[in-house]
Amino acid sequence: MPEPVLVELPPPGGKTPPARRPSAETLLRVEDVVKHFPIKRGILFKRQIGSVQAVEGVNLEVHRGETLGLVGETGCGKSTLARCITRLHPLTSGRVVFDGVDISRLSARQMRPYRRRLQMIFQDPYGSLNPRRRVGSIIGDPLAIHGVAESSERKRRVQELMETVGLNPEHYNRFPSEFSGGQRQRIGVARALALRPTLIVCDEPVSALDVSVQAQIINLLEDLQGEFGLTYVFIAHDLAVVEHVSDRVAVMYLGKVVELADTAELFGSPRHPYTAALLSASMVADPEKARSSHRVVLYGDVPSPINPPTGCRFHTRCPKAQSICSAEEPPLEMKPGDPPGHLTACHFPVQRGETLVGATPEFHQAAADFVATSQGTAAEGGG
Amino acid sequence: MSLLSVRDLTVSFPTSDGVVRAVRGLSFDVEAGRTLGIVGETGSGKSVTALSLLGLNPGADISGSALFEGRDLIAMKPDEIRRIRGAEIAMIFQDPLSSLHPYYRVGWQITEAIRTHTRVSRAQAMRQAVELLRLVSIPQPERRVQAFPHELSGGMRQRAMIAMALALRPKLLIADEPTTALDATVQAQLMELLGGMQRELGMAMIVITHDLGLVATVADTVLVMYAGRGAESADYQTIFRSPHHPYTRGLLASIPGATGSGGRLVPIVGQPPSLIRIPSGCAFHPRCPFAMDACVREQPTPAPVRGGEGHWSACWLPPDAVGVGADADNARRRYVASRRGPAALRLRGVAAAAAGGILHA
């Protein structure tokens, strides 16, 4: 009897993904991209009464072979920007230059060859797969639509893809409902890979998955990047995930990029007060870090993108705001003392070693008042 | 005496597909003024546990006991538990949009809670509601008290729900995924708010979550659940520094930024099991890199381990097999190599194939 093979547990933090070196060559350039969604009123004669300014003048470069992380909170425009890049939304103005060609004004037919090279993975592994179609045809669709492979050849290619992403190729004829969340996300990955794309935009690819399954998908994406030389734009709200996968990170707030830097640089010394607050708010699964770190608590909510604040859009919640912040919009630029590539849009960037104060003492007063006043009512009640 | 003492809680739901055994013999304690974090994945039974404590699981078969200040919540009649629910034990839910009634104004919903349990006038209750909204940092509370839930943002809705839960100054607050639907900065606001309220009111909390980051931040004691059972429990430092159960250790290795991680993530192979067909022995054995024959045959009972005071784990590994580093894993591996029998080896073959990405069903 042959010696059975034991599963060897990889040492934690041991094996590193195959070395990949992002080149300095620009693959994708986003130039002054603006996306407004009109708000209309009226039944017969619709007139525009305003617009949601989802993305407002974003400039970004994505280098070949790198992972650019895009972070920000709900409504900051990161998903809209992703859809602008992949041309799922037409732009209001600006340009998206992919591999030297402006794709933002191409017709659907002209766009076709670029669609093959520009793919997307979506957040919801349940909503993004048609429940009535078999997995084989879902993954094979891109091949059929682009006329890449004949039907017999197509099946072979699809099964190859399924194997690449860690699915059993024998499950070719199953429906999406027969797969778990993690496996469905693998199906989404296989579909995105089918046409051998250059750039994949991943919009919250692991947010809907269980913790133990998240790591499987993150590792898969990393392996595929090494194997096929992929470039990723990776959107997530989980900062630990973004820090783990990204080479560079862009932080968005209300439709604008407020800070952009190499991952270690951004997480190590954030310069924009919003970035600092966001980083301090994220809860790391390490009790020492989680409890020792000084938390900058921002008050209030993100303002409405229909009527964004003047000047710097963050000034209404910024602990460092002064009068110039509401009057003049700060440009996204390199600040003195920062390494090249670290850009910040702020009049008063956070200094290295500076601690921001966000919490207001009013809360503690309010809490004390509440305890004092409700003491009576709680006691006299009962029953 | 603990504020809440749950012993051998078992909850199952008869369905047409079979009996869903959501909770299978769970025991834990919550001390007054302290926070217990219950961690687990989808289907680990953590939410069902909370709902069962409050009698909110109609149709379920529940056994075991849950002594709250000496009174057994499980044995209570509906009208008895109604007097406790809201007034002494309050709960906040993950999704504030579906747990606030869309038809009623926020103020009405808060005053309803107050007037159900205390004899106060409508106007007095409304004044309290305004104060509560102010307390949870909702701007312009006099105006917001008249708002409908849909007129508030997600963070504000969650704060309104916290206001409602705190209205009667409960001794225990159960927060089921309180911040999952919210952005990081709003999450920080809310946890600071809850922490502040806890200090002011001396309230105990059970925070149910899948987010180890949240647990690392707020919990005093942590209970890790898997397939309806407690896998491991310890104080928050021990659980992150010297976990015993391979599931806890696996969770820590699979999330970026956790204690002892770095470089490549190490996922747990496979998927959480179905609660209708729970694996034999230890429910985690098909996914466990340290499975032995005993694990397939026999369910381990919670036993003290050498991590710290009050640290227990339900696993057949020896009590000193704690820790996250490579050394700790090697020690576990050596022990397992000496104990691994033929059944576990066959099983390993399957897991090996799964890890290699060939078989993933």
Image: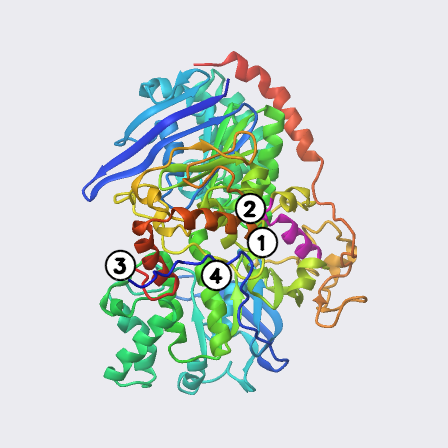
Q: Position of residue B183 (x, y in %)?
A: 54, 50
Badge 2 is on which residue?
B213
Badge 4 is on which residue?
A204
Most common SS among magenta residues: helix
Alpha carbons under labels 2 and 1: distance apart: 9 Å
Quarter holding the C terminus of chain B is bottom left
Q: Pointer 2: residues within 10 angstroms few (<14), some, or many (20+)?
A: many
Which badge, 3 or 4, comes first in the chain's sequence?
3
Q: Pointer 1: residues within 10 angstroms few (<14), some, or many (20+)?
A: many
Secondary structure, mark 1, is loop
Alpha carbons under labels 3 and 4: distance apart: 23 Å
| Marks 2, 3 in one chain | no
Label number found at residue B257: 1
**Which residue is pictured at 36% across the width and 64% down the height?**
A128
Badge 3 is on which residue?
A178
Which residues, given as a range, are shown in magenta? A272-286
Q: Is residue A288 above or below residue A154?
A: above
Q: Position of residue B261 (x, y in %)?
A: 57, 54
Label number found at residue B34: none
Alpha carbons under labels 2 and 3: distance apart: 31 Å
